[in-house]
Amino acid sequence: MRVMVLVKANAESEAGVMPSAEILEAMGRYNEELVKAGVMLAGDGLHPSAKGARVRFEGARRTVTDGPFAETKELLAGFWIWQVRTFEEAVEWLKRAPFDGGTEVELRPIFEAEDFAATLTPEQRARDERLRAGLGARA
């Protein structure tokens, strides 16, 4: 099972305040544990929303809104993608993360092709497999 771990933004991350050397060291050690355990597939921090944009889709119309965005509590500061046996395992890994100060982190399972088995045609399944193989080749 794959899960996405979503690290919520806060006022400091939205202001572009970089983590201290101590925090970076602790996070580096934690990420090393995740990699050694075969859990971490990807992960990175995100620039503040001031450097981002949102695109709204309404029929054929596309509206682009440049950041920054209000409601910091709804924004992301970073993410991981983990491969775990169970959702509970992901929760246990996250509980070991070196966060403090009210940081909020969300875990969500990622859909797999099997989740769409009832509606996915054989052609769609083959396309999905080709795309995933191409992604793996880029790594």
Image: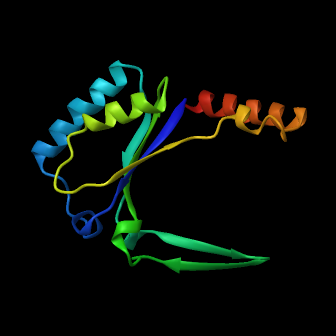
Residue pictured at 89% horizontal, 32% vertical: 122
Q: Position of residue 29 (x, y in %)?
A: 21, 30
Q: Is residue 56 left or right of residue 74?
A: right
Foreground pick, 94 / 61: 94
Instruction: Give the quadrant of residue 74.
Output: bottom left
Foreground pick, 39 / 22: 39
Q: Residue furthest front?
A: 88
Q: Is residue 63 left or right of residue 88?
A: right
Instruction: Give the quadrant of residue 21.
Output: top left
Q: Is residue 27 above or below residue 89?
A: below
Foreground pick, 62 / 38: 38
Q: Is residue 126 above or below residue 79?
A: above
Q: Is residue 7 left or right of residue 128?
A: left
Residue pictured at 44% horizontal, 36% vertical: 42
Q: Position of residue 76 (x, y in %)?
A: 39, 59
Q: Position of residue 92 (x, y in %)?
A: 33, 31
